[in-house]
Image: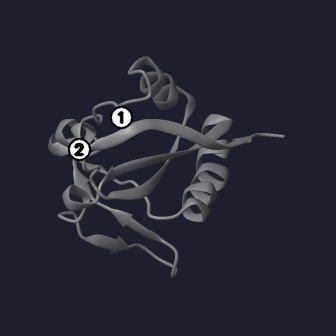
């Protein structure tokens, strides 16, 4: 009997360009960060991800997507939870240079669970 690792559900707000790169990976990995992006920060709840997608991505890019994915809990636990505002504004801070390894610990596929578009 195969033992499945415990999973931690995480969320990520993205724009169209990032979504296209994730789709190109077969929905299995997040693309490398840009030089001016030293941290990859998945968030811990869907409401916070939706708030970012709606309030930041839509005005700036015209569209925002909310992604949900699972990561091996034992691996994710090495990244301390950072609160960046309100009670629900919790995220993990993954150094950009560790993103390739982070991707190796994703369980299953990354899925789109929300879409926000400009009126």
Between 72 and 100, the one lying in front of the other is 72
Q: Pick whichever, 84 or 9, lies toward us.
A: 9
**Circles 1 and 2: CB atoms closer than 8 Å:** yes
Q: Which residue is mark 2?
A: 102
Q: Residue furthest bottom?
A: 87
Residue in the image at 61% along x and 36% along y: 61
On the image, the x and y values in percent for residue 116 come to 71, 43
Q: Position of residue 17 (x, y in %)?
A: 50, 26
Q: Give the quadrant of residue 73.
A: bottom left
Residue 115 coordinates in the image, percent (x, y): 69, 41
Q: Which residue is mark 1?
A: 30
Few, some or many residues within 10 Å of mark 2 (<14, 14–19, 20+): some
Q: Position of residue 95 (x, y in %)?
A: 19, 51
Quadrant (top left, top right, bottom left, bottom right) of the C terminus: top right
| Mark 1 secondary-structure assignment | loop
Q: Residues within 10 Å of mark 1 (few under 14, many from 20)?
A: many
State the image quarter where residue 99 is shown.
top left
Q: Measured along the vertical axis of the image, is residue 18 above or below residue 87?
A: above
Residue 27 located left or right of residue 46: left
Q: Is 69 rendered above or below residue 6?
A: above
| Earlier-in-chain disc, 1 versus 2 | 1
Q: Is residue 105 above or below residue 19?
A: below
Query: In the visual, does 43 lie left or right of 3?
Result: right
Q: Disc 1 and disc 2: Cα gap in Å?
A: 9 Å
For the N terminus, the image quarter is top left
Residue in the image at 41% along x and 73% along y: 84
Nearest the viewer among 85 and 7 is 7
**For residue 35, side relative to residue 31 (left or right):** left
Seen as rendered, the residue at the extreme front is 1
């Amino acid at each position: 009997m195969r033992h499945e690792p415990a999973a931690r559900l995480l969320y990520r707000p993205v724009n169209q360009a990032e979504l296209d790169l994730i789709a190109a990976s077969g929905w299995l990995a997040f693309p490398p960060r840009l030089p001016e992006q030293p941290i990859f920060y998945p968030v811990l709840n869907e409401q916070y991800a939706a708030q970012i997608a709606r309030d930041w991505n839509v005005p700036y890019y015209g569209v925002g997507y909310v992604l949900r994915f699972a990561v091996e809990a034992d691996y994710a636990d090495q990244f301390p939870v950072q609160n960046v505002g309100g009670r629900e504004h919790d995220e993990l801070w993954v150094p950009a240079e560790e993103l390739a390894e982070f991707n190796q610990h994703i369980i299953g596929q990354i899925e789109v669970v929300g879409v926000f578009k400009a009126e």
